[in-house]
Image (cartoon, helix red, strand yellow):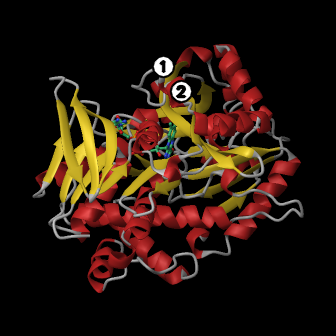
Amino acid sequence: MKKAPRISLIGAGIMSATLGILIKKLMPDAQITIYERLDRVGAESSNAWNNAGTGHSAFCELNYTPQRENGEVDISKALKISESFEISKQLWAHLLQAGEISTQSPFINDIDHMSFVWGQENKDFLKARYKAMNKYGIFKDMVYTDDFDQIKDWIPLMMEGRNQDETLGVTRMEIGTDVNFGSITRAMIRFLEQCDGVELLLAHEVEAIKQIDNGWLIESKNLTSKQDKTLAAEFVFIGAGGGALPLLEKTDIPEARGYGGFPVSGQFLKCNNPDVIARHEAKVYGKAAHGSPPMSVPHLDTRMLDGERSLLFGPYAGFSTKFLKNGSYLDLPLSIEMHNVWPMLSAGIHNIGLTKYLVTQVMQTMEDRFEFLRTFYPEADINDWELITAGQRVQIIKKDEEDGGVLKFGTEIVTNESKTLAALLGASPGASTSVSIMLDVLNQCFPDEMNTKNWQTTLTNMIPSYGQSLIKDADLCMSIRDKTTSILKLD
Ligand SMILES: Cc1cc2nc3c(=O)[nH]c(=O)nc-3n(C[C@H](O)[C@H](O)[C@H](O)COP(=O)(O)OP(=O)(O)OC[C@H]3O[C@@H](n4cnc5c(N)ncnc54)[C@H](O)[C@@H]3O)c2cc1C
């Protein structure tokens, strides 16, 4: 890449904000343009009310630790996600300590993460999971109990009205977190705006991305003045969340062919009774029902939003053809093209269980949803709860030689051959792992620069564990965690 490269970041969510910060630190003279179709930053999936705010560290999310047929619990994904979250915390701590970001109330809060299961089979699974995880420094502080009184001490609200004979199992990690991803996104973009060579274009919708000899032309419309604007860039990142797939299709790169997307909206029950909210202080994740998708794992969550405490239960799935919460009902139909129609149909045929799950979810009444809440909190009163709609997730459907099309639940970085464009598809595990995902983008698109001493020194300055394993090196993990815990005031 030449000196003073022009870089376009499409979307002002946590992904573009993170990549913008990394790029500005690594290439201080880069000219960065951030496009955002809304008139504010971090207002789609990254907005605190549009996601669950869990700092995904795999402490409590049972879907990251599947059980193999031989009974062993596979914790490889959990280790990777946990390490990624430690990496995110390091960057946030660095920016906070350097005075480069600030927020009115803390954007990250210390909330216990617990897994809660019932029934002998689930209890055995949780114990096996705990034993497999506890061997690693990164999960060292995890504790397990099946003692009724101990559980009651940890989560009294959930134990009200339960029978002493119930078979229960719980793990607890006291260093779990609740994160306001919207707040950190806005803080990072505020910092970027103060840097030389950074321009934030709010209410600018990118309509086309055209390849030219030395990069790309980005065509956008100012949604207020209705004026068109065309700017050139040598590198483009499509961090448009649910809007990334349609934009990727517009680039016409061969690597985009065969991708489709299916939107699923998230809904939560929100508690409006201050007395109930005050009696629960944890993020408690259960086990997803058999056949349901990973993002459906139920949890009863304490949230800290702008200094105020709330209590949410969910998620429930809703259906909308919009790819963005503030999108258009035509998003899904317009995304269907010749190259992805078969992958989408095949994915549908191979995921009948998921289709059934979604239909059942959409058909649910408030009473059905409430009955589910009562499996967590038996004495819940329906009058204390209201249904709220969170953000949209666009599940990726990818062309597959054998099956025609497969449904992917993670995130996927799509790049062109010359590595001048990268797009991020999918939304899980999401914002928590944003720093690792953006480092992956840099590794794929700037491989030579990432190997230079200059870049590595800068990265190590921001992320002290950069290039080392927090999974293998327990001492390093503990010392880094202690430091970020102290800077982010999580103790
Ligand atoms: C219900 C739900 C619960 C979740 N829970 C968690 C959780 O507990 N923990 C976690 O870590 N993650 C969670 N996630 C995932 C997390 O919210 C996302 O991974 C993350 O916010 C994605 O960030 P982003 O920057 O890619 O997208 P976004 O925050 O959606 O930002 C994309 C931006 O691009 C803009 N845009 C779109 N199209 C255009 C265009 N054409 N031109 C200009 N701008 C455009 C949009 O307006 C938007 O502001 C959850 C998501 C959902 C939906």
Q: Is mark 1 within 8 Å of ligand 1?
A: no
Determine whether the residue tagged by mark 2 lies in a helix, strand or loop.
helix
Name the quadrant where ligand 1 sits.
Answer: top left
Query: Which quadrant would the N terminus be assigned to in this image?
Result: bottom left
* Amino acid type, callout 2: Leu
Work out which residue is located at the far bottom of the displayed protein and give it.
453
In the rendering, at what x and y percent does residue 379 appear? 67, 25
Query: Residue 332: which disc?
Result: 2
Counting the numbered discs, the total is 2
Q: Going 60% across and 44% down the picture, which residue do you hit? A: 258
Asked if residue 335 is positioned above or below residue 71 in the image, the reply reads above
Q: Which image quadrant for residue 251?
A: top left
Label 2 crowd (10 A; few <14 / some 14-19 / many >=20): some
- Answer left or right for 388 relative to 207: right
Q: Which residue is mark 1?
A: 329
Query: Which quadrant would the C terminus be assigned to in this image?
Result: bottom left
Q: Nearer the viewer, residue 266 or 203?
A: 203
Q: Is mark 2 within 8 Å of ligand 1?
A: no
Q: Is residue 311 visible?
A: yes
Asked if residue 453 is positioned above or below residue 65 in the image, the reply reads below
Work out which residue is located at the far front of the displayed protein and give it.
213
Determine whether the residue tagged by mark 1 lies in a helix, strand or loop.
loop
* Amino acid type, callout 1: Tyr
Q: Is residue 269 visible?
A: no
Q: Are marks 2 and 1 in contact (CB under 8 Å)?
A: yes
In the rendering, at what x and y percent does residue 191 appear? 18, 53
Q: Which image quadrant for residue 37?
A: top left
